[in-house]
Amino acid sequence: MSQMPQQAAVSKCPSCEEPLESGDRFCGACGYDLSAVPARPVDSPTIAVNGAAPARESTPDGVDWPVARDSDGHGHPAPVHAAAELPGTDSGGSPLPSAPPPAAPSASPESSAPGVRFDHPGRPQEPDEYPLQAPDPRRAAEPFAPAAPASVPAAGDKVCVACRAGRVDGDGYCENCGHAQPRERDHMEQESGPVAAVSDRGLRHHRNEDAFSVGCTALPDGAPATMAIVCDGVSSATRPDDASLAASRAAGESLLTALPRGTHPQQAMHDAIVAAAHAVNALAEEPATAREQAPHQNAPACTLVGAVVTAGLLVVGWVGDSRVYWVPVDRSTPPARLTEDDSWAAQMVAAGLMSEAEAYADERAHAITGWLGADAYELEPHTASFKPDRPGVVVVCTDGLWNYAESAEEMAEAVPLDAAARPLHSARVLVGHALDGGGHDNVTVALLPFPAPSQGAGSA
């Protein structure tokens, strides 16, 4: 029994691509003779690992197919031709006519290449130009006013310190570049007659918890008097920045009120410390403190140190570990420290248990034993009076400065020689000295020349 020749295994009709079923001899859609479909050649390319061309093998049908040349025989790569460069023939074997090169497209049909149309049959020809719509006379009458950017600061607005162009919003950020602005208390400077003070946040703290108050006034006999109060907020307490600000303001106002009335400067200093203590105690009763304390009860607290200078008297007062130094104009005479710290280290030295070097090297050295605040022990304001016999400069500062100039000699070396004549400049120099040393704490310093010069008299 003769067998039918095996047809090519195809899944679609080669003519119309209609799906086929196994065993079909003719396409059910177009009648194509499927037995005429040639067998699919075996395609199993081999690629050498080193990238060399594989050796040519004879195909299964015995036909020796040509292989493309790698070069033109002269060591040059074989030329590559585009399809349009090769001659072709029609179905009768005659050469095809050569077509002219296409012309560059033109905007109008008349200038285009033959047989090419850029217009569309059945569609009206589009114009080369479109007339613009006439402007609305109502809009034309309106004057042109470009809108200003929202971030441009108006007169009186605070300008960004970063871009110098944007307005600063109520939250302290630039509306133009988004830069957070420095807080007002990050760096403060004030000069009142012959007395000046500078306070800086330092390099490690996220806010400035120091505050100061300076001023000058006159005694009942017309003699000049200057004063400076410096407060250091206790960081472990709640709202230390508010405590130092309240204490410095209360003490400063008390002194400037009492001195013109004839109150003795030493008594006035004592009363000023008491007034500062009351101001800090009142903060513990405010709702803002109660919310911030929960669930831990911790009243606001700070230290205080101050000085009053008259024509022949120097009065100092303190609670805590901020200090007052005396630096004479004649640097050949010795300087002096005029306060004693309310601290663990000072207690160890006073009790004879440790030397000063050993005590201040201990990690407990700066633990204070006296402060202003509702949870403080019994308030004990310290005051002292001095009558220097020569001109000099009084340095009132927090531990943010004296940590880098602890002894009186070190402080005198850091104070500029012209400090009595340029107190503000010298205060800036001392703050810079602390920042150059590391700036681990807030830094505040006030300078008062002694004796108080008469040209600085007047209300602060």
Image (cartoon, grey):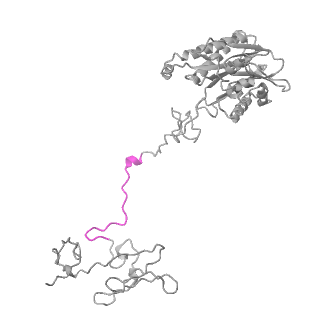
Residue 26, how many percent across, how many down? 16, 77
State which region is magenta: 119-141
Horizontal side of 187 relative to 107 (left or right) equals right
Judge by depth and name the residue closer to the eye, 432 or 118: 432
Quarter of the figure with residue 443: top right
The answer to whether 379 appears left or right of 424 in the picture is left
* Secondary structure mostly seen in the magenta stretch: loop
Q: Quadrant of the N terminus?
A: bottom left
What x and y, as percent, mark residue 34? 20, 79
Q: Is residue 210 left or right of residue 457?
A: left
Say whether residue 190 is visible.
no
Q: Is residue 354 above or below residue 267?
A: below
Determine the residue positioned at 53% across, 42% down: 177
Left or right: residue 242 versus residue 90 is: right
Q: Do we see residue 106 in this rendering?
A: yes
Residue 418 falls in which quadrant of the image?
Answer: top right
Q: Position of residue 383 (x, y in %)?
A: 71, 13
Residue at the image position 33 percent from the left and 72 percent from the top: 118
Residue that lies at the very extreme toward the left in this rendered image: 1
**Residue at the spot 36% in from the left edge and 62% down from the top edge:** 130
Q: Is residue 369 magenta?
A: no
Q: Quadrant of the C terminus?
A: top right
The verdict on residue 124 being magenta is yes
Spot occupied by residue 84 in the image (x, y as percentages of width and height): 38, 81
